[in-house]
Image (cartoon, grey):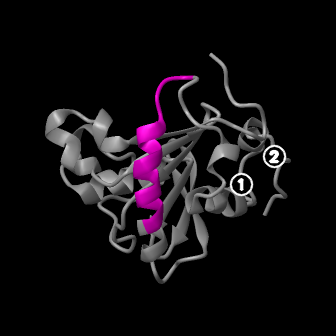
Amino acid sequence: MKIGNMPNYLVQVFRDADSAEPDETALYEGMFTMILNIAVQISFVPAVNLDDPPWPAEQKPPIDELTTPAQARWNQLINGSYSVTPDAARAGTAEQFHSPDGVGTVFYVTPERFAVFSEELTGLSDLTGGPGESPVHDDLLDRDVITFIDGTILESPYLTPAAASIVGRSAPQSR
């Protein structure tokens, strides 16, 4: 299996609903997972009410009992390493969630920007195949979502040294 050369890393995008059980696809509609160089995962999660979580952040979500899109979105946000979600009031900021499984970072964008990302992610998911069948970073520089990842997520002080290394970046300065 060949991965992209760093920093021209491999970019794969998957619709989360496509990997869900048939009776659970509605829970994951509009959610995407982007994987950089087969290792760094970024979740794109539609809007969810962040001020009213379905369970405390310190409690592990009941993954087998998710019954609503809001629960599935919350689960993804607090368990993903890096997530992007729309929130007009928090746009341009990031925050970390601590869960029993570790620490995840959520990056907030405007609803309008998230809509652009969703459209681009839909197109990118159509380009993603198996290893060797997915685009590399330098082929996608015209996409707003790639510009955001480059300028925000990969430049964030929340990026772990391991993730930085995987995509050919210097380790970020700690907060």
Marks 2 and 1, Cα distance to the nearest angstrom? 8 Å
- Circle 2 crowding by C-alpha within 10 Å: few under 14, some 14–19, many from 20: some
Vertical side of 103 occupied by 87: above or below: below
Quadrant where the C terminus lies? bottom right
The residue pinned by badge 2 equals: 169
Residue 45 in the figure: left or right of residue 12 = left
Residue depicted at x 71% and y 52%? 159
**Callout 2–callout 1 Cβ contact below 8 Å:** yes
Residue depicted at x 45% and y 52%? 121
Q: Position of residue 126 (x, y in %)?
A: 41, 40
First in sequence: mark 2 or mark 1? 1
Q: Residue most toward the left?
A: 23
Vertical side of 95 occupied by 102: above or below: above
Q: Position of residue 106 (x, y in %)?
A: 54, 61
Q: Residue most toward the top?
A: 1
Q: Is residue 42 magenta?
A: no
Q: Is residue 118 magenta?
A: yes
- Circle 1 crowding by C-alpha within 10 Å: few under 14, some 14–19, many from 20: many
Residue depicted at x 40% and y 50%? 122
* Residue in the foreground of this view, choosing between 40 and 11: 11
- Label 1 sits on a secondary structure element that is loop
Could you tell me the amino acid type at mark 2? Arg
Residue 57 seen in the current view? no
Q: Specify the principal SS of the magenta part.
A: helix
The residue pinned by badge 1 equals: 154
